[in-house]
Amino acid sequence: MLRVGSFPEDEALDRSRAERCWDRGLNPAGVGRQLRAILASGSRKERLRNVTAPTLVIHGTVDPLVHPMGGQDTAASIPGAKLVMIEGMGHALPVPMWPQIIDAIDKHAHAADAKAA
């Protein structure tokens, strides 16, 4: 998890999450396979122009794994996509950001539903 900043609500859950991950089993080789798959798949940017589904891109302004420009570029590459940048959010979804994320998804789903009707 790539959380940036201090989020006591999330930190209180860290031990329990870590124990569940440990119990489930670690797979260090899986990290390497994931990275190789990302590199081997190449850019999907050209194909994003063909996305016709109503699209909402949610990205953190301080994401250390995928730079915020990556989220902006993804949204710009999908026709009609909406971009929501969550101030202070990294790559994780901290509990304090949930209301903003849920609200964005709710509004997006309702707008898509109204447009389809």
Image (tube, helix red, strand yellow):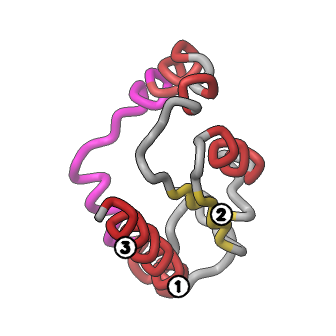
**Dots 2, 3 in contact, CB < 8 A:** no
Nearer the observer, 3 or 27: 3
- Cα distance between the residues tagged 1 and 3: 23 Å
Q: Which residue is mark 2?
A: 60
The image shows residue 69 at horizontal and vertical percentages of 77, 48
**Dots 1, 3 in contact, CB < 8 A:** no
Q: Which residue is pictured at 59% across the width and 17% down the height?
A: 42
First along the sequence among labels 1 and 3: 1
Q: Main secondary structure of the magenta part?
A: helix
Q: Looking at this rendering, what residue extends furthest in the top direction?
A: 40
Q: Secondary structure at mark 1?
A: helix
Amino acid of disc 1: Pro
Nearer the observer, 114 or 86: 114
Q: Which residue is pictured at 37% across the width and 73% down the height?
A: 110
Q: How many marks?
A: 3
The image shows residue 102 at horizontal and vertical percentages of 43, 77
Amino acid of disc 3: His
Q: Secondary structure at mark 3?
A: helix
Residue interval drawn in magenta: 15-33
Q: Secondary structure at mark 2?
A: strand
Amino acid of disc 2: Gly
Say which of marks 2 and 3 sits in front.
Answer: 3
Q: Which mark is residue 96?
A: 1
